[in-house]
Image (tube, helix red, strand yellow):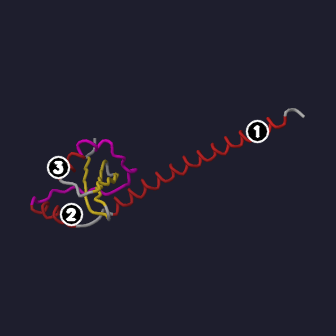
Amino acid sequence: MGKSNCRLTVFFEEPFWVGVFERVENGKLSVSKVTFGAEPKDCEVYEFILKHYYDLRFSPAVDTVVKERKMNPKRIQRDIKNQLSSKGVGTKSQQALKLQQEQNKQARKAKNKELRTAQAERLFELKQQKKKEKHRGR
C-alpha cells in the first residue's frame, strides 16, 4: 500500500477565491479545483474539507516525481511561509486541471452531438409521418 499526500492551496483568481486540491498517490498527481466565491475563513475551509472532500472530482492522474526526505521543522515553517506568499498553482497541477477540462469538454461535445442527432431523427420521422398522412393511398 503506497503513501498518499494531499495539499490544498487557496488563492485569489479574479474575481473569486479558488482552492486547488493536489493529491499524490503512488507517484501520480491528480487535481481538483473548487471556487469559494468570497474569501473563505479557516473554519469554512476546514468545514468544506470535512463535508465535501469525498465529493470532489479529481482530474486523471499525471505521473510526477515524489521526493521523500526528512526536513528540519524550521525549514518546514519557512517553506510553508513561502508557499503562502507565492501565487498560483504548480505547473503539474495546471496540466492536470487542463487535462480534466479537456475530458469534460469532449464528453459534453459527444452528449450534445447525440442530442442533436436524436432531435434530427425525431424531426425526420415526424416529416415522414406527415407525408404519409397527406398521401392517403391515391
User: Which one is nearer the viewer's eye here, 121 or 84?
Assistant: 121
Residue 83 image label: 2
- Amino acid at dot 3: Cys
Please give left or right for residue 33 compared with residue 122 in the image. left
Q: Quadrant of the N terminus?
A: top left
The 10 Å Cα crowd at callout 2, few under 14, some 14 to 19, many 20 or more, is few
User: Which one is nearer the viewer's eye here, 108 or 4?
Assistant: 108
Residue at 58 percent across and 45 percent down: it is: 115
Tell me which label, 1 or 3, sits earlier in the chain. Answer: 3
Q: Quadrant of the C terminus?
A: top right
Q: Quadrant of residue 73?
A: bottom left
Q: Which residue is mark 3?
A: 43
Magenta region, main secondary structure: loop
Residue 130 image label: 1
Please give left or right for residue 10 compared with residue 80 in the image. right
Tell me which label, 2 or 1, sits earlier in the chain. Answer: 2
Residue 94 versus residue 61 in the image, above or below: below
Query: Which residue sits furthest left?
Result: 74
Query: Which residue sits furthest right?
Result: 138
Residue 18 versus residue 26 in the image, above or below: below
Please give left or right for residue 68 compared with residue 135 in the image. left
Tell me the magenta residue range. 49-73
